[in-house]
């Protein structure tokens, strides 16, 4: 079977996939992604969405960048806010394709905040597509809350990534 293909099952056929098909070295490469979701800021709900690229190396390190937009979903003064971010993080997956990722989203330009996001990860059928959903986020606003501890950001996002390129040798 060619690498990256999905096996077909027909009448009377059987197959066994390799046990390591979803481990990080098989995911290495560059992915285009899109995401959308919701965030709460000062008790006001926002809708957010964006597109970007991320690269996963053979050790699970993540780098990349994205552009995003957000708008309040209630209130007369709602406007579209845009921002650009760089990404750095780490991903791990088990042989069944389920895993976790932690990504630092550093605001490079525009509106928005730098955050650290935690994600649940699922390889979606083959190593050319990944789904992620937020599991936790920490607001890195330089203005510390009164207790001095980082603020948990209230957001819920989903992401779908599709392979653009294999890793460079």
Image (tube, rainbow, N blue to C red):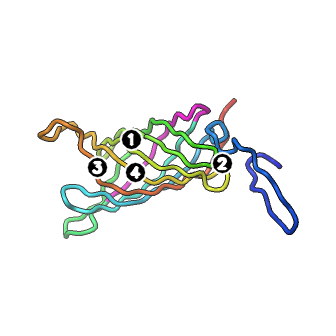
Residue 46, given in percent of the width and then of the height, sits at: 29, 61
Q: Which mark is residue 162?
A: none
Q: In the rendering, at what x and y percent does residue 164 appear?
A: 63, 47
Closer to the eye: label 4 or 2: 4
- Residue at (63, 49) in percent of width and height: 96
The answer to which of marks 2 and 1 sits earlier in the sequence is 1
In which image quadrant can residue 156 be found? bottom left
Residue that appears at 43% across and 40% down: 103
Tell me the mark number nearer the camera, choosing from 4 and 1.
Answer: 4
125 relative to 48 in the view: left or right: right
Looking at the image, is mark 4 or mark 2 earlier in the sequence? 2
The residue tagged 4 is 135
Alpha-carbon distance for marks 4 and 1? Answer: 15 Å
Q: Give the mark toward the camera: 2 or 1.
A: 2
Label 1: which secondary element: strand
Measure how far apart labels 3 and 4 are at the Cα level.
11 Å
Q: Which residue is mark 3?
A: 153
Quarter of the rendering containing residue 78 = bottom left
- Label 2 packing within 10 angstroms: few (<14), some (14-19), many (20+): many
> Quadrant of the rendered structure where residue 6 is?
bottom right
Question: Disc 1 marks which residue?
Answer: 105
Which x, y percent locates residue 128? 65, 50
Few, some or many C-alpha atoms within 10 Å of disc 4 (few <14, some 14-19, many ≥20)?
Answer: some
The number of callouts visible is 4
Q: Residue furthest left?
A: 146
Considering the numbered disc 3 on the image, is that residue within a helix, a strand or a loop? loop
| Residue at disc 2, secondary structure | loop
């Amino acid at each position: 079977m060619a690498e990256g293909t999905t096996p077909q099952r027909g009448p009377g056929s059987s197959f066994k996939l390799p046990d390591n098909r979803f481990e990080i070295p098989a995911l290495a490469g560059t992915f285009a992604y899109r995401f959308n979701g919701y965030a709460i800021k000062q008790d006001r709900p926002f809708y957010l969405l964006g597109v970007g690229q991320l690269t996963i190396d053979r050790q699970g390190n993540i780098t990349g960048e994205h552009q995003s937009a957000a708008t309040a979903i209630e209130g007369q003064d709602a406007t579209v806010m845009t921002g650009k971010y760089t990404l750095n993080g780490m991903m791990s997956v088990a042989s069944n394709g389920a895993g976790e990722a932690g990504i630092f989203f550093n605001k490079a330009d525009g509106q928005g905040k730098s955050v650290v996001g935690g994600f649940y990860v699922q390889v979606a059928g083959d190593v050319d597509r990944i789904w992620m959903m937020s599991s936790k986020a920490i607001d890195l606003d330089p203005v510390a809350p009164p207790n001095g501890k980082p603020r948990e950001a209230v957001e819920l996002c989903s992401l779908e990534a599709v392979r653009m390129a294999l890793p460079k040798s």
